[in-house]
Amino acid sequence: MNRAGKIGLASTCAALVVVGGIGAYNIVHGLTSGPAGDAQTKVARTFDPSAVSSTPPTDAEAVKLTRAFLDSWSKQHLGDAAGDTDLPDAAAQALRGYADGLHLKTLSFTHIRSAGPSTVTPGATKVTFGVTAQVADGTWSYPSAVAVRKSTNDVLAAHWNNSVLYPGLGDDQSLTAGKLPADTTTVKVLAGDGKTDLSIFPSLRDITATIRKNAKPAGGNPGTGVAVVDGIGTGVKALKVFSKGRAAVVKTTIDARLQAVAETAVKDAHLQDKPAGTVALDWRTGHILAIAHTGADGDIAINGIKSPGSTMKIVTSAALFDQVGLAPGSPAPCTDSVTANSQTFHNDPGVRANPASTIAQAFTASCNTSFIKDGFHYLVNNGDASTLHDEAVNVFGMGNWSIGGGVATTDASIPPDVQGGDQAAQFIGQGKVTATPLFMASVAATVRNVGFKQPVILPGQHQDTALRQISRRTAGYLQSMMRSVATSGTAAPRLGGLAGVGAKTGTAEEGDDTNGWLTAYNSRIAVAALVEGGSSGVDSAGYVVRQLLTGS
């Protein structure tokens, strides 16, 4: 340490006895000694960090320097303590921050022992010690250590970094005591029952972390103790808890029981480990009751943007009813193939041609050519194919949704300016049309509720509204047709016999593969599922949807 001042010879000698007892003595001012008339100047020696000896200090030397450093620190002689380090300015500031942050009352050190050559700091000897600190609201004890180095002129210094204050403490971190700071891990994100922690569900772990970080929690008491904080005072981790607090909570709309069903459903053995995603909604409120997914490409339940295939025929039928005035009994001939804008479209295997088919019959059998013919004939006017887009936006609420808590979702898309064959492909959910299980569950919910309720995961979260609520006439038509799909149509193999169920299957081509879709509702929920690589909607997504409908 560096202590400057003019002192008399007698007092200097006395001072050397006292200060020497804690192993520190740097005399800056020259002293006169020897015979009268002879002058000898003693120049203070300081640690030179640019000239560090490769030979570590002896155990005794290292312990002696450490005792001096700790003695000054315990007495809060912080300038003296900092002077025993190789970075006095940084050490002084950090030691002051330690005392202030902890509201330090007393500090003591025990078991000061050499641990031999340091394995971290070259040319240093490691000295370990125990720390006991009386801080705000309690006593904190912990082990620590310091590396002691020697410069080539034989001056010793404690190598300074923040880990001297507490092992592993980063340069941009500090310590605080008293009321524990807010920490993202102290906020619980719960299901709608107010009890179940959503982090127990594999599909919701990322969503839970996002909500914990972004949503405003209610209640809670952080408790008291010692914690590490970052440069802006945000809690990093608690080191010592004096009194336990009570976690603040964020309550969501998730139904814990249904979420458990969904987690199992997306792993149904029939799917053969294909990526799957599903969303269930309360169709009355738009509250998200379950989100589950598998696969390595993220949450496909809310972000798996794929062509929805024939599930889009719900929106196409609504547009034909609303914009053209057609009805379920209106003609919709089902042929083996049809050409529109020089592109030829076919039906899925197993769909039989029926030239006398109606819209309702074509919907039940999921005949592509019927919807290509009626859609392209009635809903494309002078090259303008934006009617399906308008119906999706104005009636089914397609847009930029925020479900709450900072949880990101991918928006469905039906471009208003499609050209060529895409003008026809959109009516069967192909071409440039994309959607997620979240959106398709909302489509089914809009039909069952006779009105759009934007999906949300936080109660009280703002819900966008549709420009025009679906008419009771159109909703009634769609409910009747979706009921036929479930009882005698393409969804019957999975959903037949379930009371009050309406549904629509979908199989969408994606390169050489297909994706299976199914969206449905019962008396309580609306649900949609996507299985990537599913051979058909009913034989892939159908297994997922059935479990949710029967488990709701």
Image (spheres, grey):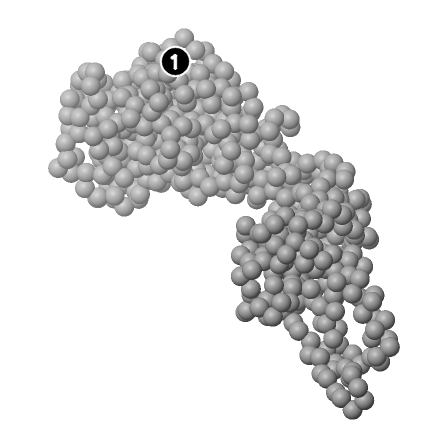
Relative to 84, 287 lies left or right: left
The answer to whether residue 473 of the structure is visible from this angle is: no
Q: Nearer the viewer, residue 464 or 222?
A: 222
Q: Is residue 366 above or below residue 341?
A: above
Tell me where residue 76 appears, x and y as whole percent: 79, 60
Residue depicted at x 72% and y 58% = 64
Q: Nearer the viewer, residue 109 or 163?
A: 109
The answer to whether residue 119 of the structure is visible from this angle is: yes
Residue depicted at x 40% and y 35% = 298
Which image quadrant for residue 224? top right
Residue depicted at x 40% and y 28% = 294
Tell me where residue 370 appears, x and y as whole percent: 22, 25
Q: In this view, does 349 lie above or below 60?
A: above
Three-letter code, disc 1: Leu
Which image quadrant for residue 541? top left
Q: Nearer the viewer, residue 74 or 119?
A: 119
Tell me where residue 445 appears, x and y as whole percent: 45, 27
Tell me where residue 269 appears, x and y as whole percent: 37, 16
- Number of numbered labels in the structure image: 1
Residue annotated with mark 1: 495
Disc 1 crowd, CA 10 A, few/some/many (<14, 14-19, 20+): many
